[in-house]
Image: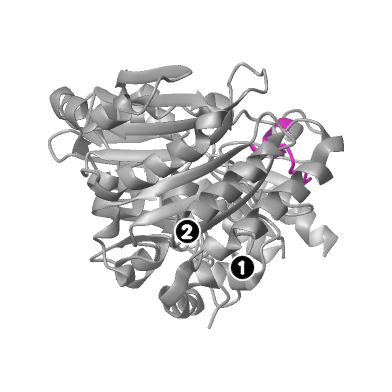
Amino acid sequence: MLGQKTNLLNDLRTALSGPVLEPGQPGYDEARQVHNGFIDAAPAAIARCITVADVIDAVNTGREGGFEITVRGGGHNVAGRAVCDGGLMIDLSWMKGIYVDPRARTARAQGGVTWGEFNRATQVHGLATTGGVVSTTGIAGLTLGGGLGWLMAKYGLAVDNLRSVEVVLPDGKLVQASSNENPDLFWALRGGGGNFGVATSFEFDLHEVGPTVTGGLLAFPIDRARDMLRFFREFTSSLPDELTMFGGLVHAPDGSGTKLCAMLLCHCGSPEQAERDLKPVRDFGTPAMDALGPIPYTAQNAVLDAGFPRGARNYWKSNFVASLSDEAIDTMCDQFSRCPSTMTGLLLEHFHGAVTRVPVEATAHAHRSPGFNFLAASEWLEPGDDSTNIAWTRETFDALKPSFGPGGYVNYLGGDEPEDRVAASYGPNYQRLREVKRRYDPRNLFHMNQNILPA
């Protein structure tokens, strides 16, 4: 078997437009690193693809050689599913093609594109689509998992703006998935993650956004945390579609360790409407940090970048919140007071507007109810601090369980989640996803993900 794998990798090396990297070769260690520094895996080989034909050859090599196959787009997935020990990483990060059609208001982008790159290309034409809140996140993973972002209240999730996907299936066949072609696969790709093949490009609807929006953040002293979170809860109960807001408990970005409470937002309406809509926020109190105002949409999409540096060690726990009660707010504040890392935050991402008007069964992403997604985003730098930070994150998650609703956001699930958490995240759509998985990947070749077992 080892000889067969070696021969297949040699054949792949000859065929591939980019390099096939193995341990010890220049560039290997850099290529195997993903965004989460907590992940340290050594694949047997990394196929750095440049063309769709490269991806097809890599899939065929992985299947025929019996390799564990992982797929890397932007490499941001907190669970580190893009890499595994001894496997074949199909690396799309060099596939950077973007084509924008400003008349049709559409864009097609390849699987290695990040949201920062995508927004840069579309904002040339004053256009955008919902796409994440950290600009270094890849479009592929974020979209396949649903796609929260600053424009979701006005235009829905990334999957709600998806027109088609080009996919290399487990048998190496290249297909298009859209509402007209392979519609069952298209349905599953809109939230079902990387379970069905390698998505080599995505076509999105675009909307008139920017180049300037009203956004940024307001941060307040931590002793205002309970009051601010209660205000946030009440204010978000009747937001216009143009306004997407997050709230949470964070640390000052200067590294001082100062604890703050903050509201982060993006208003994509006119400046006049934004001024009216945001007056209650402005009137809430005197901020310790005021970074709210006109901002380029490309900068809005990068406003959290510094808080999620590449190489930091990450461990996240997340779940949808059924009710943001006073008790839940008190628990968040109490837990944050004992937070062991000055890089960690507790966030509440608010759902309303267009994202909640899509029927649950319309896409694989099932969470369509107004409310909040809770995220304990733990980050630290030193390996010696792993156990302390992981324990605190789990304790915080467990303390908030009485406030949780069913399921979580698939893109935030960690690497140690039980199978029932994956099923719960898809809710009533899980069984249909299993049927689509059986049709397109009955042997579960693509299982290095938040895995959906074939029916």
- Rendered position, 355 above or below 210: below
How far from the left and from the top, in percent, is residue 233? 38, 47
- Is 213 or 19 nearer to us in this picture? 213
Residue type at mark 1: give it: Leu
Residue type at mark 2: give it: Val
Identify the residue at horizontal 47%, vertical 25% (top origin).
219
Q: Main secondary structure of the magenta part?
A: loop
Residue position for label 1: 445
Mark 1 and mark 2 lie on one chain; the one further toward the N terminus is 2
C-alpha gap between disc 1 and disc 2: 34 Å
How far from the left and from the top, in percent, is residue 368? 34, 62
**Residue 149 seen in the current view:** no
In the picture, measured across the screen, residue 312 lies left or right of residue 116, that is right
Residue position for label 2: 321
Circles 1 and 2: CB atoms closer than 8 Å: no
> Residue 201: within the magenta?
no
Question: Label 2's element?
Answer: strand
Residue 145, numbered circle? none
> Residue 36: within the magenta?
yes
How far from the left and from the top, in percent, is residue 397? 64, 55
The magenta-colored residue range is: 30-44
Identify the residue at horizontal 58%, vertical 21% (top origin).
253
Which residue is situated farthest in the bottom direction here? 455
- Is 415 or 91 nearer to us in this picture? 415
